[in-house]
């Protein structure tokens, strides 16, 4: 087996949440290109259908399940369907991340609770139940998409980094709990990516001096630049990587 063979996902089944567009779609696409059957999730069936069509037209294997990630019954139903149809789950990428860019003083309890449910609690229950399927084969990859917001702070963004920091702690606990079962748990912390969500900011020329000063590579990341990190952590090439946060931010968080 060559080192390139160790990146193959042939014969494996992956579940990627929030995969209709942006980073989730690029991760799903990369896993499919490497040979996995990928199940994409999101809230809207029409956007998921388009994402699955793009992957299958490129020669990949994919399907979708449309539901709100915070709906735990729907989580269980989706995992049960994967078990019935494929008999296994090898990779889970918890990618969903809602955001509410307001000062904490302007957020009521309901807004805070909703973000925590979506960004942290939903990921915890899904990872727990996915790991139960992975244990059967003594192999699995749990990948959490956190954020550099879990390491550094910005004004008017209090709950999102709190949830992402919690997700990092969860990832490390799972690394210890599930490691003996052949399941690794790692995280990817993206920096500033020019996704659809950040399109307005990424196209703001007035912001570019700050980007060039603050990010050593002096630009926003392309959405597809997340794919290599995800494929690595999902692969046998990362078989001894467990409990790690892989920062993909162009050097932003290490610059003084």
Image: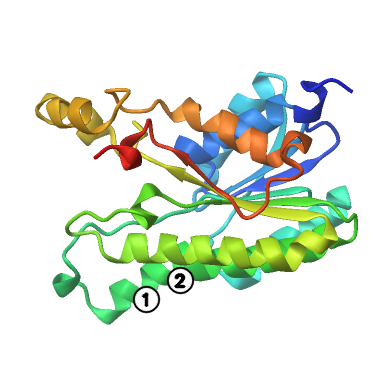
Residue 1 makes an appearance in the image: yes
For residue 55, the mark is none
Front residue (pair 213, 192) = 213
Left or right position of 48 against 161: right
SS state under label 1: helix
Quarter of the image that includes the C terminus: top left
Left or right position of 194 against 3: left
Q: Which residue is mark 2?
A: 117
As drawn, the residue found furthest toward the left would be 206
Q: Residues within 10 Å of mark 1 (few under 14, many from 20)?
A: few
Q: Compared to 247, does 89 lie above or below?
A: below
Residue plotted at (72% across, 68% down): 177
SS state under label 2: helix
As drawn, the residue found furthest toward the front would be 256
Residue 78 in percent (x, y) is at 70, 59
Q: Compared to 102, does 230 lie above or below?
A: above
For residue 113, the mark is 1
Between the C-alphas of marks 1 and 2, the distance is: 6 Å
Residue 150 in percent (x, y) is at 38, 56
- Tag 1 near tag 2, CB within 8 Å: yes
> Quarter-wise, where is residue 134 in the image?
bottom right
Residue 96 in percent (x, y) is at 49, 53
Q: Residues within 10 Å of mark 2 (few under 14, many from 20)?
A: some
Front residue (pair 32, 178) = 178
């Amino acid at each position: 087996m060559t080192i390139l063979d160790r990146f193959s996902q042939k014969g494996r089944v992956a579940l990627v949440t929030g995969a209709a567009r942006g980073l989730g779609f690029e991760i799903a696409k990369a896993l499919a290109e490497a040979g996995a059957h990928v199940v994409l999730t999101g809230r809207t069936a029409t956007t998921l259908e388009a994402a699955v069509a793009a992957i299958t037209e490129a020669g990949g294997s994919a399907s979708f399940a449309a539901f709100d990630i915070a709906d735990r019954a729907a989580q269980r139903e989706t995992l049960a369907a994967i078990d019935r149809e494929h008999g296994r789950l090898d990779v889970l990428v918890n990618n969903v991340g809602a955001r509410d860019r307001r000062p904490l003083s302007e957020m009521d309890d309901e807004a805070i609770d909703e973000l925590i449910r979506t960004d942290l609690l939903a990921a915890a229950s899904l990872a727990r139940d996915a790991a139960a399927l992975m244990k059967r084969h003594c192999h699995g990859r749990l990948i959490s998409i956190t954020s550099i917001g879990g390491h550094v702070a910005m004004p008017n963004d209090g709950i999102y980094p709190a949830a992402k920091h919690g997700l990092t702690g969860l990832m490390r606990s799972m690394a210890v709990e599930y490691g003996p079962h052949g399941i690794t748990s790692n995280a990817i912390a993206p920096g500033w990516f020019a996704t659809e969500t950040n399109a307005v900011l990424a196209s703001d020329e007035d912001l570019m001096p700050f980007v060039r000063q603050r990010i050593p590579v002096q630009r926003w990341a392309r959405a597809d630049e997340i794919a290599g990190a995800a494929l690595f952590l999902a692969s046998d090439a990362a078989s001894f990587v467990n409990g790690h946060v892989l920062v993909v931010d162009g050097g932003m968080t290490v610059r003084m």
